[in-house]
Image (spheres, rainbow, N blue to C red):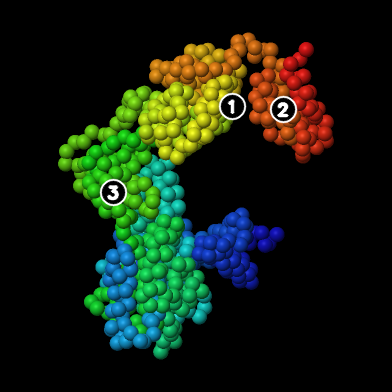
């Protein structure tokens, strides 16, 4: 009872109780810090989140009851809260230097650096290779973290190298930066490194900003820089920042009990053991050739890294050799940055064109003043869709940032931050109402960002996709009409629209590259065979948006004939099983375009045919409401054919057996499904039994 009262502050706790509580608080913090380190720095959590949360809450409760036990180092203080009036200047104990930059792409930068180092050291060709450490050059902002007696006391930006800004309140919110160091660290320790934002974190942040109608950041670097320089640390706490340590600033000298590292590599490993994140890509390299290999290797892996880099940094490994080499002006002679081609550049939008993709999507593409970015000259960049244009607020004539990473299509990232306003009025971009390729109606569905051409079968931009879809096994099943052949047929203008398929002859086929007599014959036979089809296959083959196989079957069953479907108003279409407003509207838009109807008529004229039934037959479907499972090999029908028959009779054909299954049709080598059916008492039929079911006396 007294314990409880104490916990709720009803009475003053005894001194012994306070000591116990303090111990408990410390134990909780130690445990939580260890787990947070595993989670945030090592990326290897060892306990479920719920367990972490449970202890975290326990600590919060104790700190609420005993505010005198709260310290700035407590893990609960990471959520921020301190609000500054301005960022105070901080003079760096040791200046934060910059490094010389090499920009060649071949490796001569590494060679020149190694040659300079060797010359400065007076090494002959016969002398051993110089040992280096190679590291990624992180694209964020430099940070100096000052620890006194193991406590973080100050975090400062680089500023001009001599004087930076005090951002301690913000940096305290970074889970990757330790607030307290283990015992045994030097009394004064300045750790230097880069604060940055991982690409995935950046994307998620922008996603959240977008949802809240807040500012969209142009790139991870800008987002990180903005977050670090906030006056309100509560804002920084909500921005997902990361950190990598890459060196030291001022440290207790060795003769005053400070550390005496022999190499930069050991220094980094030691920082890691003290709880600082160090990039896994840091490597030792012997001589210029290994530096070049590193440059190439990281360059190739650049787009797979979870964060942006703009180059690599080479550093002489032995610290004694670094001291001998010293500095020129404000740059060390022992380090160099070897850059990669920039992935982002500024250029001007000269116009906005529309591209129509294989599936009918209209993509606005910015025509750009040519710019060298990501290693190539870029003249076009995607703007994705109308909403992206609106969000990015770009118009023709604007100066914009263009990004090209790896093989990815170049994109317009956004306006240059802080660029002056447009000198003249430029109208906002509008999507065309008609497809620029085929003049069919352009639509945008509710809840969709993309505009689409409705010209499906007719639009030259969509021809290849339409042909492949039409020929697919589950549609018209035209064997031998694959990717490569369709490419040739369309590119050489042999085929314009679907009906042209059925007008193909031996002569035009044999004129194609790599087309043997036999394959041409086979294709013509396959085409001939495909003409006799079913209404669902034909309907599905037309490639009407949102009309998949199942919907095509439902439509065929409901209406009985293609003409009935083509003429059905939306209200009637809506009466079909599983047809909602989106599908109904899509069907209507499709069949309202005269050229789509024309394609259907021409296909019929070419001899494409299927059985049609009156809609009344629906009622007579003997298997309506039943679920059938087919398993094993049937004597005469393929499984696909059996499925078609059963579905035509109104049955639903399912893939697994349950108590609700009406029948299992089993052929040879039926396996577990048959066993399940027998176990559950589901009636089992052979093919003959199935026929009997389909044609009741
Ligand atoms: S070492 C004396 N290592 O590049 C050498 N810098 O001009 C001090 N940077 O803005 C820098 N990654 O923030 C070093 N692995 C790395 C780096 C790195 C990025 C940045 C640094 C500074 C600039 C150096």
- Mark in the foreground, 2 or 3: 2
User: Which callout, 1 or 3, points at the residue further toward the start of the chain?
Assistant: 3
Mark 2 secondary-structure assignment? loop
Mark 3 secondary-structure assignment? strand
Q: Are marks 2 and 1 in contact (CB under 8 Å)?
A: no
Q: Residues within 10 Å of mark 2 (few under 14, many from 20)?
A: few
Disc 2 and disc 3: Cα gap in Å? 59 Å
Q: Residues within 10 Å of mark 1 (few under 14, many from 20)?
A: few
Residue 675 horizontal/vertical position (percent): 80, 37
Q: Answer with left or right where residue 546 lies relative to residue 612.
A: left
Mark 1 secondary-structure assignment? helix
Residue under circle 1?
A: 550
Quadrant showing the C terminus: top right
Please give the label number shown on residue 636. 2
Please give the label number shown on residue 378. 3
Residue 301 horizontal/vertical position (percent): 43, 60
Please give the label number shown on residue 673. none
Residue 686 horizontal/vertical position (percent): 78, 27
């Amino acid at each position: 009872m007294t314990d409880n009262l104490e916990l709720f502050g009803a009475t003053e706790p005894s001194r012994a109780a306070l000591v116990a509580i303090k111990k408990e608080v410390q134990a909780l913090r130690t445990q939580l810090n260890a787990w947070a380190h595993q989670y945030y720095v090592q990326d290897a959590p060892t306990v479920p989140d719920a367990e972490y949360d449970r202890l975290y809450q326990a600590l919060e409760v104790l700190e609420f009851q005993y505010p005198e036990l709260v310290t700035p180092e407590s893990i609960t203080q990471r959520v921020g809260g301190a609000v500054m009036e301005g960022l105070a200047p901080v003079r760096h104990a040791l200046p934060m230097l910059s490094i010389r930059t090499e920009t060649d792409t071949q490796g001569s930068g590494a060679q020149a650096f190694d040659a300079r180092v060797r010359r400065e050291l007076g090494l002959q060709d016969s002398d051993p290779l110089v040992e280096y450490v190679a590291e990624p050059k992180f694209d964020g902002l430099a940070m100096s973290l000052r620890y006194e007696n193991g406590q973080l006391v100050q975090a400062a930006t680089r500023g001009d190298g001599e004087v930076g800004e005090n951002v301690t309140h913000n940096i305290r919110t970074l889970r990757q930066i330790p607030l307290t160091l283990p015992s045994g660290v030097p009394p004064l320790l300045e750790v230097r490194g880069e604060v940055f934002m991982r690409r995935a974190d950046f994307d998620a942040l922008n996603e959240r900003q977008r949802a809240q109608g807040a500012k969209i950041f142009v790139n991870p670097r800008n987002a990180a820089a903005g977050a670090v320089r906030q006056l309100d640390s509560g804002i920084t706490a909500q921005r997902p920042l990361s950190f990598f340590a890459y060196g030291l600033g001022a440290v207790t000298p060795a003769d005053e009990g400070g550390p005496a590292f022999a190499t930069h590599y050991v220094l980094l490993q030691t920082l890691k053991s003290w709880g600082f994140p160090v990039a896994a890509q840091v490597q030792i390299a012997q001589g210029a050739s290994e530096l070049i290999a590193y440059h190439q290797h990281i360059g190739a892996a650049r787009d797979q890294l979870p964060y942006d880099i703009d180059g690599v940094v080479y550093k002489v490994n032995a610290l004694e050799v670094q001291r001998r080499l010293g500095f020129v002006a404000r740059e060390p002679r022992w380090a160099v940055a070897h850059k990669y081609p920039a992935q982002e550049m500024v250029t001007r939008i000269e116009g906005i064109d529309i591209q129509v993709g294989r599936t009918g999507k209209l993509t606005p593409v910015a025509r750009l003043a040519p710019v060298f970015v990501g290693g190539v000259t870029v003249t076009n960049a995607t703007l994705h869709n109308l909403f992206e244009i609106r969000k990015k607020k770009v118009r023709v004539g604007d100066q914009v940032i263009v990004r090209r990473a790896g093989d990815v299509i170049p994109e317009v990232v956004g306006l240059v931050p802080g660029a002056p306003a447009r000198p003249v009025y430029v109208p906002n971009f509008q999507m065309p109402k008609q497809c620029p390729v085929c003049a069919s109606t352009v639509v945008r569905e509710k809840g969709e960002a993309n505009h689409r051409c409705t010209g499906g079968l007719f639009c030259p931009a969509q021809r290849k996709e339409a042909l492949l879809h039409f020929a697919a096994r589950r549609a018209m099943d035209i064997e031998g009409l694959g990717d490569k052949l369709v490419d040739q047929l369309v590119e050489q203008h042999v085929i314009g629209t679907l009906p042209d398929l059925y007008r193909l002859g031996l002569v035009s086929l044999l004129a194609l590259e790599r087309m043997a007599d036999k394959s041409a014959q086979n294709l013509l036979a396959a085409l001939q065979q495909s003409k006799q089809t079913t209404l669902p296959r034909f309907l599905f083959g037309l490639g009407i948006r949102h009309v998949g196989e199942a919907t095509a079957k439902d439509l065929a069953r409901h209406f009985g004939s293609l003409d009935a479907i083509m003429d059905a108003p939306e209200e009637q279409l809506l009466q079909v099983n599983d047809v909602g407003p989106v599908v109904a509207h899509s069907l209507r838009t499709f069949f309202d375009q005269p050229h789509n109807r024309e394609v259907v008529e021409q296909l019929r004229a070419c001899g494409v045919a299927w059985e049609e039934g009156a809609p009344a037959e629906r009622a007579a479907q003997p298997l309506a409401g039943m679920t059938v499972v087919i398993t094993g090999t049937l004597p005469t029908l393929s499984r696909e054919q059996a499925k078609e028959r059963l579905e035509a009779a109104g049955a639903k054909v399912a893939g697994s057996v349950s108590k609700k299954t009406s029948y299992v049709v089993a052929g040879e080598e039926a396996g577990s499904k048959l066993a399940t059916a027998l176990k559950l008492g589901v009636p089992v039929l052979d093919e003959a039994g199935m026929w009997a079911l389909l044609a009741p006396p």
